Amino acid sequence: MSLRSNDRQWGSVAKFFHWTMALLILGNGIFGLLMDLASNPMQKINWLALHKSIGLTVLALFLLRLLWRFGDKRPREEPAPRWQQVAAHVTHAALYLLIVALPLSGWWFNSVAGKPLQFFKQLNLPAIAGANPDISDLAHEVHEYLFWFLLLVLAAHIGGALKHHLVDRDNTLLRMLPFRRLRDGIRSQGDRS
């Protein structure tokens, strides 16, 4: 498997970014929702610090993914009606915006709450807004609602991938799965005459 993407499938670096970020985002979201189950205040503080560090990791990985994407090829799109292609592009754009907005909203919430922000207890990060307890609840709600909106957009993304795989029986999903071969005999858009 090639590190770089080609006109038929995504390369291993693009797949690494995709699946690592997906697992981190979903895991961290669930982790954030379950933090109230901490058995004592110190455990909750430690869990919260870990939640913040994972969110910052997602933000850093997104920036690296974006840099990689500028220099990497992109597989040709599978044949689909125009409305499906537009829906796919809108869904991807929304995912990218939410992947950035979610950790930034958490950073904003942390800043207005007047709490310190450390990256895995190694690096202190500056506040991106002044402490303001009056909007702390609003900032928390924005962060949480962005997560729920991300789940909705993600459901559309997964639904589209499954539709391509199970109904259209094309290579859309297979070309992003690690260690999977593409289906033979399926012509891509560029192969049609």
Image (cartoon, rainbow, N blue to C red):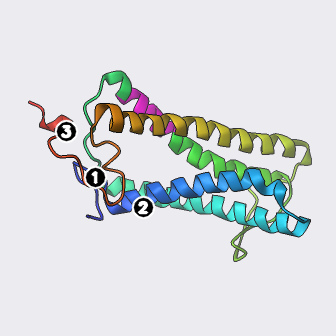
Residue at point 26%, 64% (across, down): 1
Examine the image and state in which quarter residue 56 appears: bottom right
Which disc, if any, is residue 73? 1
| Picture coordinates of residue 132, whole percent (x, y) | 88, 49
Q: Which amino acid does label 1 sit on?
A: Lys
Q: How many labels does the image show?
A: 3
| Quadrant occupied by the C terminus | top left
What whole-number distance in Å separates the C-alpha atoms at marks 1 and 3? 16 Å
Q: Earlier in the sequence, mark 2 or mark 3?
A: 2
Residue in the image at 52% along x and 41% along y: 95
- Residue linked to disc 2: 16
Callout 1: SS: loop
Q: In which quarter of the image is residue 165?
A: top left
Q: In this image, 19 relative to 25: left or right?
A: left
The amino acid on which the numbered mark 3 sits, given as a three-letter code, is Ser
Q: From this viewpoint, is residue 107 visible?
A: no
| Residue drawn at x 68%, y 52% as measured from the top left | 30
Dot 3 lies on which element? loop
How far apart are the alpha carbons under marks 2 and 3?
24 Å
Identify residue for label 3: 188
Q: Nearer the viewer, mark 2 or mark 1?
A: 2
The residue drawn where x is 71% and y is 61% is: 52
Q: Residue 158 location, x and y as percent? A: 47, 39
Asked if the magenta segment contains residue 90, the reply would be yes
Residue 12 numbered mark, or none? none
Q: What stretch is highlighted in magenta?
A: 85-94
